[in-house]
Image: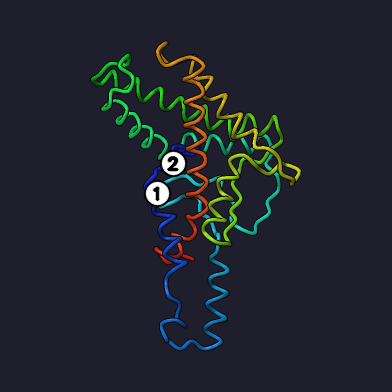
Amino acid sequence: METRRAIPGLVLLLCSVTLWSQTAPSTEETGTPVSPAQSQAGDQTNQNAQGQQTKRMLWVVPNFAAVSANTQLPPLSTRDKFILAAKDSFDYSSFVWTGILAAQSWALNSDPEFGQGAAGYARYYGHAFADGVSGTFFTEAIVPTLTHQDPRYYTRGHGGFLRRTGYALSRTFVTKTDSGGTSFNWSEVGGNGLTAALSNAYYPAQERGLSQTFRNWGTQMESAALNNIAKEFWPDVRYKVFRRK
């Protein structure tokens, strides 16, 4: 899931910076003279920086499955898909983020059956980690292999804020195939469904059942959509805020 439960604050930051970059005054509007050579160089710099992904967002959050804009990559082999899922599942940040999620659930007493104290926290941590690993392997390796789909996110990187947001949301249900076409995103939709169903095997009886499975599936799909938005706008934040090309 590559830390699939996207941090809402990160998504808000990315969206806010993108909106600011589209409304900020240009050098022409402020009256500062710009030579043709400077203008051409600036356009080239913006074009080169547009949609360029990095392996991590904010140098911590894994971003291994994001593909830079205007980039075509060869299909992933079955082995590559499982390697990608393993990298996302066992990255150091995944252990830290799982600890944060477990602490939040423990403090809120989300599952009273787990109890309190160190033993209770350990149960929260173990279940959260199992959710993350199973979700990652279902959506990035197992189902993509069976359906011959590409689990990576291909950045749009151009167009208005609403168009890019719509594109990011649509990738939750539409994805590339290994042959280069597009199809319904069984990897995301079905993979999250299998993750939600599998949780019935190790959660307490009170947290099982059809209705709970659908709620868990909905939560996973929401997280996937937010994660796509974060990926789409991360290059903008990196370039506009941190001035990295």
Q: Is residue 45 above or below residue 55?
A: below
Element assignment for label 2 = loop
Q: Is residue 36 above or below residue 51?
A: below
Residue 84: give x, y in percent of width and height. Answer: 57, 39
Residue 135: give x, y in percent of width and height. Answer: 52, 30
Name which residue lies at 52% across and 26% down. 134
Question: Horizontally, is 164 left or right of 73 in the view?
Answer: left
For residue 52, which quarter of the picture? bottom right
For residue 17, which quarter of the picture? bottom left
Name which residue lies at 46% across and 64% down. 239
**Number of dots carrying numbers:** 2
Residue 128: give x, y in percent of width and height. Answer: 41, 27
Q: Are marks 1 and 2 in contact (CB under 8 Å)?
A: yes
Q: Residues within 10 Å of mark 2 (few under 14, many from 20)?
A: many
Q: Which residue is mark 2?
A: 6
Residue 102: give x, y in percent of width and height. Answer: 34, 29
Q: Amino acid at mark 1?
A: Leu
Q: Which residue is mark 1?
A: 10
Q: CA distance from mark 1 to mark 2?
A: 8 Å
Q: Is residue 191 above or below residue 114?
A: below
Q: Residue furthest top?
A: 205
Question: Horizontally, is 23 left or right of 82 in the view?
Answer: left
Q: Amino acid at mark 2?
A: Ala
Name which residue lies at 57% across and 68% down. 48
Element assignment for label 1 = helix
